[in-house]
Structures are given as C-alpha cells and as structure tokens.
C-alpha cells in the first residue's frame, strides 16, 4: 500500500464502499469514521474476520509481535466528553459536522499548519451558526466570510474547537501484545483504518 498515494487509496476505499452498499450510501458525505467502519466490516465479511497484524512492542520499541485481531470487535468509539456544539457566548453557538475523508486528513498536525489552512479545515466542518433563534447555514457563506468570522473568535473558542477534533468519534480498538523477547505484556490502542492492516 505504501507505493500507492493517499488519493488513490481514498478513491478505492470510497469505490468499494459505494459498490458494496449498492450505491445506497453517499460515500462523499459520510464522516471518515463511518466510512472506515463500513469498509472494515465489508473487508471482514469478504476476506475474513481475523486480521493478522505485526505490532511494535512499546516496552522496547524495537521488537515486533504478531497479533490476531477479530475485526468484528472493532467499533467506532465516542469520547464521553465529546460534543458537536460549540458555545461561543450566551447567544451564539456553532453546530459542527464531522469531516469526510476528502475534507480532513486525521494525520495532519495542526501545530504545523498555516493559519489559512487551519481556517479552511475548521470552516469545512462548521455546519450551522446559531445566533439566538436565527440559524445560519455555513454553506451560505463564502470562504472569505467564514475566515473573517473565525478570525473574530477568541482563544477559548479555538480550544473548544480543538476539543471537538480531539474527541470526535474514531475507529479504534485496544489490543494486548506480548513482546516475544522480554515477555512483557502491553496494551496498544489502534486508531484509524490504517492501524488494522499490519
């Protein structure tokens, strides 16, 4: 898979889910975690529910252990602290939508992004803006208007937005590995579709 670029992998993933659901699901609108979950289940039913992984043992960070994972046990996990509503003040709040596979790369590092890139990512997941009883669809605003709005937000609001991203649902599963050299048992959290194909 490493020789194939991310765009080709995304296209193939969407194509498989679209075909296997007989076009009944709009894969372009699915949140990334739902698309990954459906794909993982299609893979489990077509190839087998057990995936054989080779995982790096965290106790020495050099030895790999073979692990068999029952894919039927992998779920989308939701953090207890998660909410898709971000309160800006007593009157204004944001309703966020979850990013699609085309709109957000979960491996992106926000710390290394330029402000405009960061605003693009945030603007893509703002669904509605509530101003009292008035609801504004984010899609009714231009990119420039959304950037201007985001620039007006306080640091506290950006902390809430960061919490939205950090706690949003994700495909994950904890596995136990035993280092074959040291016999030390450790737990590893697999997160994101790529983690389930070792």
Image (cartoon, helix red, strand yellow):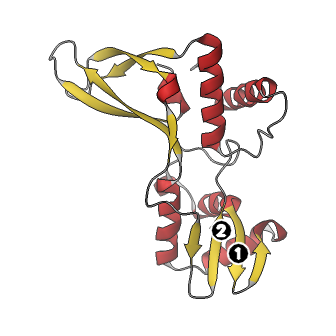
Q: Is residue 35 above or below residue 46?
A: below
Label 2 near label 1: C-beta < 8 Å? yes
Q: In this orientation, does residue 107 appear?
A: no
Q: What residue is at 51 percent from the left and 36 percent from the top?
A: 75
What number is the disc on residue 95? 2
Q: Is residue 177 left or right of residue 170?
A: left
Q: How many neighbours does mark 2 have within 10 angstroms: few (below 14), some (14-19), or many (20 or more)?
A: some
Residue under label 1, please give it.
Answer: 129
Where, quadrant-wise, is the N terminus in this rendering?
top right
Foreground: 175 or 180?
175
Question: Percent from the top left, x then y, of residue 187?
Answer: 28, 31
Q: Earlier in the sequence, mark 1 or mark 2?
A: 2
Quadrant housing residue 87:
bottom right
Q: What residue is at 61 percent from the left and 34 percent from the top?
A: 36
Q: Is residue 1 left or right of residue 73?
A: right
Instruction: For marks 1 and 2, give the CA distance.
Output: 6 Å
Foreground: 78 or 98?
78
Q: Is residue 183 left or right of residue 121?
A: left
């Amino acid at each position: 898979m490493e020789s194939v670029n991310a765009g080709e992998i995304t296209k193939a993933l969407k194509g498989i889910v679209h075909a296997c659901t007989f076009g009944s699901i709009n894969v372009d609108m699915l949140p990334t975690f739902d698309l990954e979950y459906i794909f993982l289940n299609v893979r489990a039913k077509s190839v087998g529910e057990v995936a054989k992984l080779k995982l790096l043992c965290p106790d020495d960070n050099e030895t790999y252990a073979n692990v068999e994972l029952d894919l039927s046990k992998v779920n989308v996990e939701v953090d207890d602290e998660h909410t898709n509503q971000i309160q800006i003040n007593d009157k204004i709040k944001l309703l966020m939508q979850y990013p699609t596979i085309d709109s957000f790369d979960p491996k992106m590092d926000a710390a290394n992004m330029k402000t405009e890139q960061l605003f693009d990512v945030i603007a893509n997941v703002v669904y509605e803006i509530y101003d009292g009883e008035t609801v504004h669809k984010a899609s009714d605003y231009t990119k420039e208007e959304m950037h201007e709005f985001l620039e007006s937000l306080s640091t506290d609001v950006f902390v809430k937005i960061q919490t939205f991203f950090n706690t949003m649902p994700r495909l994950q599963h904890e596995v136990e590995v035993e280092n074959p050299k040291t016999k030390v048992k450790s737990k590893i959290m697999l997160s994101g579709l790529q983690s389930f194909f070792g």
